[in-house]
Amino acid sequence: MKNFALFAFLIVVLFGTWACTPNRGCIEATADNFDAAAEENDGTCIASRDKMIGSYRYTRIWNDVILAIDTVDVGIVTITEANTAGNAFNMNLNGNLFLQGASSAYTLVIIQRAYTDTFSGMNYNHTYNGSGTWLVNDTVDFIFTINTQVPMLNGANPPGIATVPQVYNYYCTKTQ
């Protein structure tokens, strides 16, 4: 009987220890391996942007709204880690256009960026924003909308500055 009482006591202690252990897993809601049932972070979270880090060759397709012609070109976009948040990234297009964004699972959002430029002595503004979708292990598609205030030279119709929205579709394949 004494052995039975000891055995029962050990079972109760083991069950109590097992029952009080929290479910461990990734508790970061934007991570690729988010575990909704997890109660305690186990340090295994995978930031969704990590799968995008690298260089891509892109094909860009757009209809030039000013010249009214369809255009295709190619270039390089490099996506690197940003230090501001777990899923933030930096994006550099052809080494001369720097954008930032963040990802959540398979969706990417480009943070709006505006800057001023000059053409024929007239200042004008560009505003970039966009989104993207991660498709498979080595491809991602982006859509950028760039609103440009186009300086219209004297004699143009309309004169002054016209705001022109331009949509660009980027189809990117990872090169490294």
Image (spheres, helix red, strand yellow):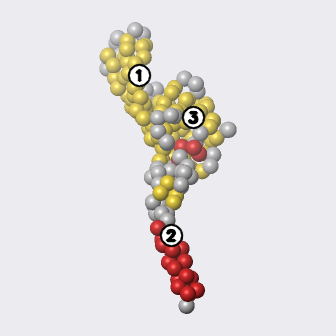
Mark 3 residue crowding within 10 angstroms, few (<14) / some (14–19) / many (20+): some
Q: Is residue 127 left or right of residue 23?
A: left
Q: Which residue is mark 3?
A: 80
As rendered, which of 124 and 52 lies closer to the eye? Answer: 52
Q: Secondary structure at mark 2?
A: helix
For this orientation, the residue located farthest to the right is 176
Q: Residue at x 49, y 42 (%)?
A: 87
Q: Is residue 137 left or right of residue 118?
A: right
Is residue 144 among what the camera can see? no
Q: Examine the rendered structure and indicate whether residue 63 appears above or below residue 14.
A: above
As rendered, which of 32 and 140 lies closer to the eye? Answer: 32
Camera-near label (2 vs 1) is 2
Amino acid type of the residue tagged 1 in the rendering: Tyr
Quarter of the rendering occupied by the N terminus: bottom right
Give residue 115's mark: 1
Mark 1 residue crowding within 10 angstroms, few (<14) / some (14–19) / many (20+): few
Give residue 17's mark: 2
Q: Secondary structure at mark 1?
A: strand
Camera-near label (2 vs 3) is 2
Q: Are marks 2 and 1 in contact (CB under 8 Å)?
A: no
Q: Residue at x 63, y 46 (%)?
A: 138
Q: Please report whichever mark, 2 or 1, sits nearer to the chain's N-terminal start.
A: 2
For this orientation, the residue located farthest to the top is 121
Amino acid type of the residue tagged 3 in the rendering: Thr
Q: CA distance from mark 1 to mark 3?
A: 22 Å
Q: CA distance from mark 2 to mark 3?
A: 44 Å
Amino acid type of the residue tagged 2 in the rendering: Thr
Give residue 55's mark: none
For this orientation, the residue located farthest to the bottom is 1
Q: Please report whichever mark, 2 or 3, sits nearer to the chain's N-terminal start.
A: 2
